[in-house]
Image: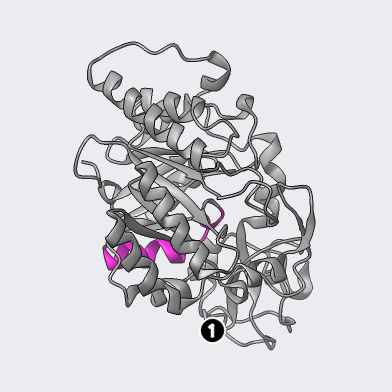
Amino acid sequence: MSIFSSDRVRIISEIGINHDGSLDKALEMIRVSADCGVDFCKFQLLKADEMYQEDAGSYATGTGSTDDIYDLVKKSELQEEWVPRLIEECEDCGVRFLTTVYDLVGLKEMLQFDPDLLKVASYEIHYHQLFEELGRLDIPIIFSTAGATIGDVDEALRAYGDPSSACIMHCNGKYPADREMVNMNVLKTLHHAFPEVSIGFSDHTEDPVEAPVAATALGAEAIEKHFTLDKSASGPDHGFAIEPDGLDELVDAVRDAERKRANGESFDLDPVVLGTSRKDTHEDEQYIRDFCYRSLYADNDIREGEPFSEDNIAVYRAGELPKGMHPKHLGDLSGRPAPRDIEKGAPITFETLLGDNE
């Protein structure tokens, strides 16, 4: 059972943070995306305070720049007051509004707009508390899997609970991704491993056509691509996004491939793009996995003997800081007394629990 209502491939224009803090630009990007024939326009509901600690360090972006990650995310936050206007513009243009939520605070914020579908970013795949809450709310989700193993995908899906209400997006965590890193045969693995789940592809390659067509040929139900009005604009996501002409090409190519798929016609797909069927962390994704995947940290000073709880443990991306335990262990820790004083911001590790006996 698909979370989508027909066999039509859903094309998502990932506007993301490429509006550069301008509402007028965001609205123009919706209009241009709609003119190209996409189905969704997607934005990112970033919350710096919920994502990184302020001293999390610097991040090497796809453009080659190195930026303080907390400041970069802070500058990229979507203004809550924009959301009704963005939704209205999407409705007027005949496309659906979609947003990525990264944390429980952003999710709560979006609930006031009654979303019928939400996206979860690749780097929240260990944030099981977010998946569990989305499952409790019975909101269908799309979630990406850059840097993830098949085990990570399985655990996130189990935390969410209802595979028939989810769409898994295969993708690679390098921006831009090389053709050799696409490994589109992973779609077959995902179909086999999770037969009740919808499968899609989030494309980070620079070509607007090749990978999306291959994904469509292999049964993808959704295709996502970063979009910009100007690749030369400053900002971390412009350089690997496609411009309007490229988005036009993508839509036309996917619709043609969709027709060929429905008619049982053959495709001439490059084996380089098909790659391996193994869903694992590519060596070029290890940096992003180490930097961006979530783990457990002390959210304030915790005194020896104080019970661990969701009030004193936070789930943050590591950045350049030492990583804590996988967030799935938060429930196991709750109620357990801290064996020593723990400073705010320190990672909660298995060694933390050993107290003076380590």
Relative to 118, say whether 148 is above or below: above
Residue beneath label 1, please? Answer: 311
Question: Going 67% across and 49% down the picture, which residue do you hit?
Answer: 288
| Residue at point 38%, 30% (across, down) | 252
Quarter containing the N terminus: top left
Q: Name the residue type under label 1.
A: Asp
Residue 92 visible from this viewpoint: yes
Q: Nearer the viewer, residue 255 or 348?
A: 255
Give the image quarter of residue 336. bottom right
Q: Is residue 125 magenta?
A: yes
Which quadrant is the C terminus positioned in? bottom right
Q: Quadrant of residue 146?
A: top right
Q: Is residue 135 magenta?
A: yes
Q: Is residue 253 left or right of residue 338?
A: left
Magenta stretch: dominant SS?
helix
The residue at the point 41 percent across, 56 percent down is: 30
**Mark 1 falls on what kind of element?**
loop
Q: How many discs mark residues in the rendered view?
A: 1
Residue 4 position within the rendered picture, expressed as x and y whole percent measured from the top left: 24, 45
For residue 49, above or below residue 268: below
Tell me if mark 1 has few (under 14), some (14-19) or many (20+) residues whose alpha carbon lies within 10 angstroms of its own: few
Q: Is residue 202 above or below residue 141?
A: above
State the residue in front, 303 or 62: 62
Write the start and end of the magenta stretch as one range: 123-139
Image position, residue 34 (x, y; %): 36, 49
Where residue 332 appears, x then y in whole percent? 50, 68
Q: Is residue 186 left or right of residue 96?
A: right
